[in-house]
């Protein structure tokens, strides 16, 4: 029973090689705190393009799905997430993935192949210190999913994978509250 609970709840925050996804730089005492209006970050996407938290203002609701290349529950839910990303008006809802175990500067080709295989055709960001401190410093398992409004305020957090219909119900409920 205990093994079943562990397997169903997601993957731990360490990959198979034991590498913690926290950026290699030691946390500094002056690490930036989230701004009063919400989460702020700077990073790069899978293609090396700069992305800032301004991306959150492009949609009424943003789902940020933190996943890892070694996490089977993460990979299992990504096809449904890809379908959801395509079904909603981008002004209403968008999905952003954060690859928890691929740091900026690492070779993202394996993660890119997983994105292509799963049809998760939405923006994916590589982990860096800014993203870590903005969202991931308390993440202990993947997948972890955050829902943010257009100002970057966190509306809800879900730890663990869900199927497409469960995500759709969650998304529609949060959109109705906006």
Image (cartoon, helix red, strand yellow):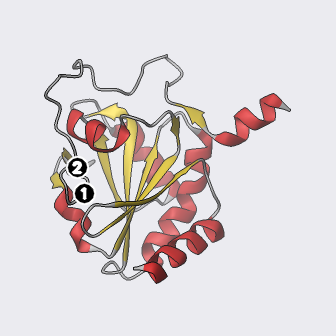
Q: Residue at (55%, 60%) from the top-left corner?
A: 79
54 vs 44, nearest the viewer: 54
Q: Is residue 10 visible?
A: yes
Q: Position of residue 165 (x, y in %)?
A: 64, 71
Sort mark 2 into few (<14), some (14-19) or many (20+) by Cα contacts within 10 Å. Answer: few
Q: Residue at (45%, 37%) from the top-left corner?
A: 139
C-alpha gap between disc 2 and disc 1: 26 Å
Which residue matches tag 1?
38
For the residues labelled 2 and 1, say whether their Cβ atoms are less than 8 Å apart. Answer: no
Secondary element type, mark 1? loop
Q: Which mark is residue 47?
A: 2
Q: Position of residue 113 (x, y in %)?
A: 43, 45
Disc with the residue nearer the chain's start (2 vs 1): 1
Q: Quadrant of the C terminus?
A: bottom left
Q: Position of residue 71 (x, y in %)?
A: 56, 37
Q: Which mark is residue 128?
A: none
Q: Residue at (51%, 70%) from the top-left corner?
A: 83
């Amino acid at each position: 029973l205990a093994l079943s609970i562990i397997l169903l709840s997601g993957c731990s925050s360490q990959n198979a090689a034991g590498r913690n996804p926290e950026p290699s730089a030691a946390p500094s005492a002056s690490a930036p705190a989230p701004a009063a209006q919400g989460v702020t970050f700077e990073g790069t996407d899978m293609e090396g393009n700069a992305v800032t938290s301004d991306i959150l203002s492009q949609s009424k609701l943003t789902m940020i799905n933190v996943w890892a290349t070694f996490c089977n529950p993460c990979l299992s839910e990504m096809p449904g997430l890809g379908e959801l990303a395509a079904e909603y008006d981008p002004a209403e809802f968008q999905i952003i993935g954060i690859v928890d175990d691929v740091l900026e500067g690492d070779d993202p080709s394996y993660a890119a192949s997983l994105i292509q295989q799963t049809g998760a055709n939405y923006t994916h960001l590589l982990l860096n210190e800014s993203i870590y401190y903005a969202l991931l410093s308390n993440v202990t398992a993947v997948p972890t999913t955050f829902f943010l409004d257009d100002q970057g305020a966190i509306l809800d957090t879900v730890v663990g994978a869900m199927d497409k219909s469960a995500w759709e119900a969650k998304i529609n409920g949060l959109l109705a509250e906006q």
